[in-house]
Image (spheres, rainbow, N blue to C red):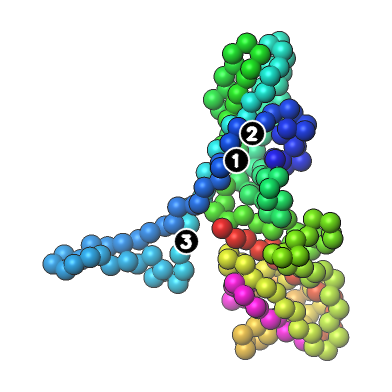
Amino acid sequence: MKINDTHMLNNLGLALSRVDCVQPPEPKINTQDIPGADGILDLTESLVGRTLYNNRIITMEFGRGLEKSAWPTMYSRVQSLFHGKQVKVIFDDDTEYYYSGRAAVSDYTRTQMLGTLVITVNADPYKYEMYGGLDDWLWDPFNFQTGIIRSYKNLTVSGTRDVRIIGRDKIIVPLIISNASMTVTFKGKIYNIVAGNNKIYDIEIMEGDNTLTFTGNGVISIDYRGGIL
């Protein structure tokens, strides 16, 4: 598995001791007791109409054999790379997605040549697609069963153009980048776009099909990256 650009086994010789280190994020459950009545009032979806989640904690224990004199250097290297840093975590059996969060290095132990350490990542509840709408799309890592081709970069608008975005679990407001003023229609409503970066908070890409209709003349790009649990 990789943390940022470092493959822990190939680059550092550190083997992951457990493969079940990613557990579901805890939902933000909001309930209220009703005096004099059975049960409770569940208000979990009342605020935004959907379930929200806390960050998920990813705990990874690594170990390897190494000469005793080399362990202080190894431990310092791991801390320099990851401790307190914002990281991307990519597992070898789930290379289409990454987890994003802040890492902490702890629980360093050593018995003669064998040493272990723990890297904990306080991660976003969702894992994100490796390739978003502005990234160069590659054939080799693409999963034809579950993957979605996202090619929303430098799209020419000459009159009217529909852009279809298949949304994932996480509701995301995309960044629309345009080189000219134009309009975009979403769910029957028309919004103005200026030259430059545009965040229109009424345009939320939800799970399933989403169509944005651009009207005008210019070139647009849409920065959207799907997230799933």
The location of residue 54, given as percent across then percent down, is 48, 53
Q: Nearer the viewer, residue 70 or 204?
A: 70
Indicate yes or no whether the magenta region holds residue 209: yes
Q: Residues within 10 Å of mark 1 (few under 14, many from 20)?
A: few
Q: Residue furthest front?
A: 145
The residue segment tinted magenta is 202-215
Number of numbered tags placed on the structure image? 3
Is residue 33 visible in this depiction of the protein?
yes
The location of residue 10, given as percent across then percent down, is 77, 33
Q: Amino acid at mark 2?
A: Leu
Is 31 above or below relative to 218?
A: above
Give SS at disc 2: strand
Is 134 above or below relative to 204?
A: above
* Of pointers 2 and 3, the one earlier in the residue sequence: 2
Q: Circle 2 sits on which residue? A: 16
Q: Circle 1 sits on which residue? A: 19
The location of residue 58, given as percent across then percent down, is 56, 42
Give SS at disc 1: loop
In the image, what residue occupies the spot 68% across and 48% down?
93
